[in-house]
Image (cartoon, rainbow, N blue to C red):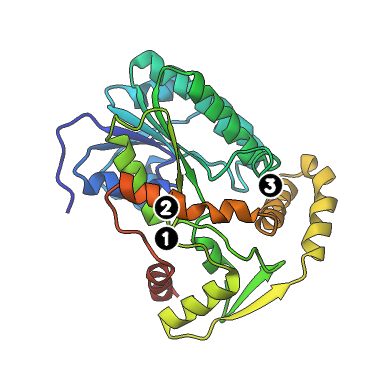
Amino acid sequence: MAQQSSRAPVLVLGGTGHYGRHIVASLLNHGEAVRVLSRDAAGARKILGSAPEIVEGDILSRASILRALDGVSAAIVSVSAFNLKQIRQMARIERDAVLAFLAEAEAAGVMRTVYLSVYEVRPEVPGGRDLDSAAVKAVVEGTLARSQLNWTVLGAAPSMQIFFAMIRGDTMLVPGGGPPALPTVSALDVGEIAAQAALRHDLGGKRLRMVGPETLSFPEAARRIGLATGRTIRFRKIPLALPRLAWAITRPLARHSDTLLFVNQMLGMIRLLNRIPQDVAAGTGEAHRILLETFDYVPTTIEMEARQWSGQH
């Protein structure tokens, strides 16, 4: 049970998102006061409960940002516009608004900043620059590096939920079959690592990669999920030719439709899954070792995720 804190709150941007809600929960469990900026205060309250302070406002509004920053001790930026309603405004929300927020935070003296980014932003890594969201995050990282903020970048591997998102009934359907080894991370671990990072001041100027205890192929993930839940989860590879064709068709049409733009970006992520260089996967052991040396937490395994998923299905 989290205890009420008398300390200045930690501000979480994107606090109702896939990672953000776990960041909020972890901060509360550490006894910290938490403030969340949300366009829908009532909706945020349904997701986060009564413990965090909710400031209703928009990240695109300077007035909202100034109200959210007032009196906070640190800020965690976990902003994502990767959804059908906001996909057209991705650069405006994830890049322009975040850059404006960082400038206001620095001006207000809120120096401790944790930024959630993609696992890798190297140009030679597929998706490191060719997906819109990754390109945007690379710009923000560059701006942080030139700032006076006490910043830490946390590069998140794909969410472990990707394995479960591919399951329909008792079959895991994977376009292209996926890579031989995919680094993933649990949203629970992201929440705890980000919370601990925000409460520390000795991680300034560092970029840490967040990844789970092991890399898995989709067939192996299906087998392990089945064993953990007492079910038979079959793996089925779907030919990648159709998603590739659909990506090529939707690319020029995406500027005319939010739906087609979202579909195109989703198809791009599917293509990315099958193009992840294995040197990236090979480096995850070292990245995970650094996490364990830096933070105090118990890593979430695929079996732990599977049991929670099974209870919901």
Left or right: 303, with 242 as reference point: left
**Residue at image location 52% in from the left, 86% down from the top:** 232
x and y percentages locating residue 181 in the rendered image: 58, 63
Q: Which disc is residue 283 wearing?
A: none
**Residue at image location 61% in from the left, 52% down from the top:** 279
**Residue at image location 53% in from the left, 66% down from the top:** 216
x and y percentages locating residue 149 in the rendered image: 40, 21
* Element at label 1: loop
Instruction: Quickly name the residue at label 1.
Output: 213
Q: Say whether residue 141 is visible.
A: yes
Kind of residue at badge 2: His
Q: Earlier in the sequence, mark 1 or mark 2?
A: 1
From the viewer's side, name the closer residue of 280 and 182: 280
Q: Which disc is residue 126 wearing?
A: 3
Kind of residue at badge 1: Pro
Instruction: Quickly name the residue at label 2.
Output: 288
Q: Dot 2, crowdedness within 10 Å: few (<14), some or many (≥20)?
A: many
Figure label count = 3
**How far is disc 1 from disc 2 in space, using C-alphas?**
6 Å
From the viewer's side, name the closer residue of 14 and 137: 137
